[in-house]
Amino acid sequence: MKVDEALVDYAASYIKDVIVKFGPRYGCSKAERDANVWTKDEILAKFCDETHFEEFQTEVELYPQGFFKICGLLGVIALVFMPMNYGLAIASTILIILTIVVLYTELFLMKRWIAFMFRKGTSSNAWGVVKPAGEVKFRVVLEGHIDSAKQMHLAEKDKLTLWPLILGFLYLFFTIVMSVIKFLGSVVPGDFINTQATWGPFLWSEFDWYYFIPAGVLFPCFLYLVWGFTGGSVVPGASDNLSGIAVSAAVGKYFSDPSHKLKHVELIIGSMGSEESGDRGARYFVSQHGDLLKNAYAHCIEEASGGTSFNIIDKDFHTFGKLYSPEVRDRMDKAAERYAKDNPDAYKVGHRSLPLGSSDACMYLNAGYKAGWIVSMIEKETPGGKKKGIAKPANWHSMRDNWDRTNKHTLRDCIGMTIEFCKIVDEEQSK
């Protein structure tokens, strides 16, 4: 199919309007709520058969910046204990192990066991229903998220240098090893380590030279690592992820037209809150609406207005090794193929597994529902046509992620492929 240019303009206008009217929209903020109320009343209500607005509580500051800051603080305190006497030096190991536990359980498992350290706020989801012409036999959830992230300093860099980050992680393991060795100096008989100076609880030995000289490089890299994954400013959040809502709304609007009505597939068009703080909106939606999801596909859309290629995600670090639903991914592939036949200039679509990063889709999958997601990325190629560097979403968590960088080609392709996806599912239900 060919996507009507007016539909692309509709999606692009939504992105611009939200940013101009409400600005950056951190989770649980007034701006996030106002933007979601406006999305429900001025967008979804115009083409949906019914609309809903739901609020929920969450600790928005916890994920990801909150626990990164806690890890940074623990890593700094660990350094302070290293020059102390042998017995106290083991505290460095304890603190670094705690750092690693917090990092793993909060970043990868999203356990939120340190939630008591953060205040709760109120976030929201807005969603609408587009009914089919006939009996509802199946549902497709199309959604993006309304909130925008806090800036990550590393995201502002066009080219990311990995060595400082690697050395920053190495600081953690180096400190564990050296702390244990120094502690053994207090329990092993003999002159295991020669003491050179003491002052109160501090004890300087020849061993400390072996630790602090390398730490002079590793510790600044650790601070750089923490700094890189944190930031104070809230980004505009155009591609990440107003574009996901924009595409979902454009597709919902298309199928609300009587001449385009699906026969047996009901669409749920979602604008979820607090995705950037650990997919909280999707988590709440899944917990409340299992009745809608038992016979449905969740098709989540991320970064749909900035990249020059698309990736269907096979798995990510929040799916715990599970693949996203083959039923959803296969139909995404088929939709991309059908769309490309009528649009030879369509951006390429591939598959990717993400070692870092996720989307709302993980909450559907981990709750036992069928889900998948697609994201646009910047692909750089050499003059010979080979891929250059690591593909990444355009302007991700960057202050550059504003409405004036919207790529309508990317929007067009994502709208077209999503429409084809819905048609394919409807054709199957109509047989």
Image: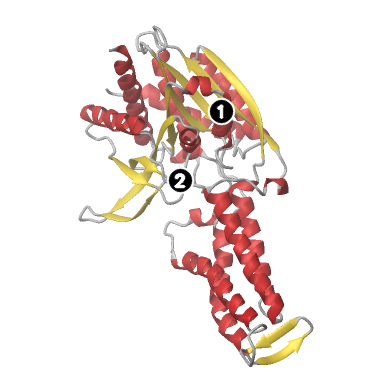
Q: Nearer the viewer, residue 325 or 184?
A: 184
Task: Give, as a three-letter code, the residue at label 2.
Answer: Phe
Q: Earlier in the sequence, mark 2 or mark 1?
A: 1
Residue shown at the point (58%, 81%) measured from the top left: 211
> Is residue 351 rendered to the left or right of residue 211?
left
Left of 188 or right of it: where is 337?
left
Q: Is residue 369 visible?
A: yes
For this rendering, which residue is in front, 161 or 3? 161
Which dot, 2 or 1, sits closer to the camera? 2
Identify the coloring. Answer: secondary structure
Asked if residue 39 can be seen in this view, the reply is: no
**Residue 346, quarter of picture:** top left
- Compared across the picture, whether 81 is left or right of 46 comes to right
Identified at 33% across, 27% down, the residue is 416
Within-10-Å neighbours for mark 2: few <14, some 14–19, many 20+: few
Horizontal and vertical percent for residue 206? 61, 90
Q: Position of residue 89 (x, y in %)?
A: 67, 76
Instruction: Locate the N terminus and report the quarter of the image it occupies.
Output: top left
Nearer to us in this view, 195 or 272 = 195
Query: Real-space Cα distance between discs 2 and 1?
Result: 21 Å
Q: Which mark is residue 285?
A: 1
- Determine whether, in the image, residue 186 is placed left or right of residue 221: right
Disc 1 residue type? Phe
Say above or below: 40 vs 350: above
Of the pair 422 and 190, the residue shown nearer to us = 190
Quick one: SS at disc 1?
Answer: helix
Find residue 335 and report its horizontal and vertical position in percent: 29, 28
Residue on which disc 2 sits: 320
Residue appearing at x 42%, y 46% in the figure: 321
SS assignment at label 2: loop
Q: Determine contact: label 2, label 1, CB under 8 Å.
A: no
Q: Quadrant of the C terminus?
A: top left
